[in-house]
Amino acid sequence: MYYKVHEALAEKIPKPNLVVYLSAKTDVLMQRIAHRDRPYERAMERAYIDELNQAYESFFINSDLPYNVLKIDTDNLNIISRPDDLALVETRIRQALKLVPFQESLPLAT
């Protein structure tokens, strides 16, 4: 059923210009899950997260996808508490899309 619905809708959905794959090692993912401490994530086993992580890696890196994939290693990034890390991710995306660097408007003197 899923595939029938997908086929019916897929032709109406434009292909993305870029897919951003934020990757991290399984140990880092486990630390982030523990840090978030969400009740529904507490029982997740490392083996499951590792298998899921490998599946994402295989899908995004080893497949012949019809769109561009930007892989960003986030092992040493913390986009939640370090604004510079988020800015780095934004810069990488802008570079991949060949967009001019983003600059906020300067305040006007009154």
Image: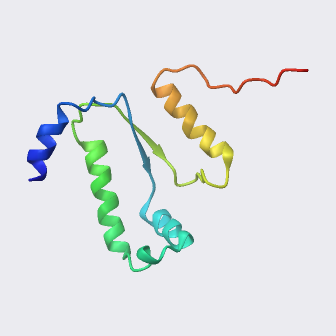
Farthest residue toward the right? 110
State the residue at coordinates (52%, 28%): 94
State the residue at coordinates (27%, 50%): 58
State the residue at coordinates (42%, 73%): 41
Instruction: Report x, y in % for residue 37.
Output: 53, 74
Q: In which quarter of the image is residue 87?
A: top right
Picture quarter with the C terminus: top right
Please determine whether, in this image, residue 35 is positioned above or below residue 105. below
Q: Is residue 12 left or right of residue 23?
A: left
Instruction: Report x, y in % for residue 66.
Output: 23, 31
State the residue at coordinates (62%, 26%): 102
Q: In which quarter of the image is residue 70?
A: top left
Q: Name the colour scheme.
A: rainbow
Please determine whether, in this image, residue 13 is positioned above or below residue 109. below
Farthest residue toward the bottom? 43
Could you say which is closer to the camera, residue 42 or residue 56? 42
Please determine whether, in this image, residue 34 is positioned above or below residue 55. below
Instruction: Report x, y in % for residue 51.
Output: 29, 65
Please determine whether, in this image, residue 76 is positioned above or below residue 51. above
How many tags in the picture?
A: 0
Instruction: Report x, y in % for residue 14.
Output: 27, 29
Q: Quadrant of residue 62?
A: top left
Q: Is residue 56 left or right of residue 63?
A: right
